[in-house]
Amino acid sequence: DAKTTQPPSMDCAEGRAANLPCNHSTISGNEYVYWYRQIHSQGPQYIIHGLKNNETNEMASLIITEDRKSSTLILPHATLRDTAVYYCIAAPPRGTSYGKLTFGQGTILTVHP
Amino acid sequence: ETGVTQTPRHLVMGMTNKKSLKCEQHLGHNAMYWYKQSAKKPLELMFVYNFKEQTENNSVPSRFSPECPNSSHLFLHLHTLQPEDSALYLCASSQDRGEDTEAFFGQGTRLTVV
């Protein structure tokens, strides 16, 4: 799996958009970009994933650059409950690699009132 | 609630004890995983099961023994653990259907070895 680089921490004001960057410059053509988050002492929660097109769901939007070397997770209206560690993972969609995710240190997002 | 249930949520055990962690999923998934998360460290993949067959063991010490009796249940048997084995143990499941799909994680078992 390609290595990803994320800032260790970010702050965001409640109600504002949170934009979390991720660098994956060595990503290969068949690797997807997955985002998960982990609220303190709970299991990771899937947020969104994409290959090369921008994606949006009820939780977030994912913007992937045209060269696929970086991406941004956008939480459009951050709430206090969005405070968590956010993980960006590049992994191929083959076999049991779907759940065989390699987690890094992630970004600690703190949403302030 | 993610559809993946782990029990117990908290466990304290002595180094000479034998205990088991249980994971159950009702999502119809065919792949299940054990992860370990130590303090201040990223999640580490321990074991992978696909259709009840172990397909990966990430150099995990033999004091951790997984068991997958069917596609819905996964156990992690623990014996003669060390204090450094204290961690959050997470179970996950996913569906291997040849396409991209997400993994669902349980809430984890917080294990303390004394």
Image (cartoon, rainbow, N blue to C red):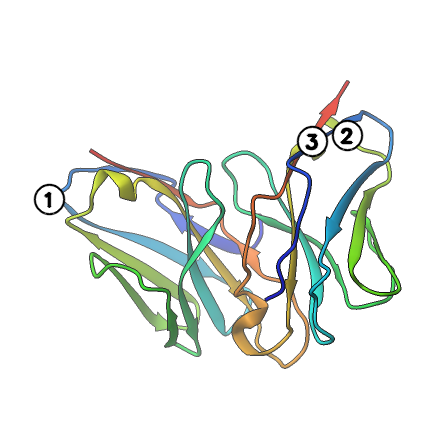
Residue A79 at what x, y percent from top left? 77, 30
Marked residue chain, label 1: B
Q: Are marks 1 and 3 in contact (CB under 8 Å)?
A: no
Q: Secondary structure at mark 2?
A: loop
Q: In the rendered picture of this protein, how many numbered marks are placed on residues? A: 3
Q: Position of residue A23 (x, y in %)?
A: 73, 53
Residue identifier under label 3: A81
Q: Are marks 3 and 2 in contact (CB under 8 Å)?
A: yes
| Disc 2 crowd, CA 10 A, few/some/many (<14, 14-19, 20+) | some
In the displayed structure, B79 sits above or below A17; it is: below
Residue A29 relative to residue B6: left or right: right
Foreground of the two, A88 or B54: A88
Q: CA distance from mark 1 to mark 3?
A: 40 Å
Q: Which residue is mark 2?
A: A79
Q: Which mark is residue A49?
A: none
Q: Which residue is mark 1?
A: B16
Residue lying furthest left in this view? B16
**Does mark 3 fall on the same chain as mark 1?**
no
Q: Position of residue B92 (x, y in %)?
A: 49, 59
**Neighbour tally class for label 1: few under 14, some 14-19, many 20 plus, Cα within 10 Å:** few
Where residue B8 sits, quadrant-wise, is: top left
- Secondary structure of residue under mark 1: loop
A80 to A6, vertically: above or below: above
Quarter of the picture holding the C terminus of chain B: top left
Residue at left offset 50%, top offset 55%: B4
Between the residue at mark 3 and the residue at mark 2, the CA separation in whole angstroms equals 5 Å
Q: Could you confirm whether marks 3 and 2 are on the same chain?
A: yes
Asked if labels 2 and 1 share a chain, the reply is no
**Which one is in front, A59 or A108?**
A108
Find numbered disc 3 in the image and state the secondary structure of the residue it sits on: helix
Disc 3 marks a residue whose amino acid type is: Arg
Q: Is residue B91 left or right of residue B21?
A: right
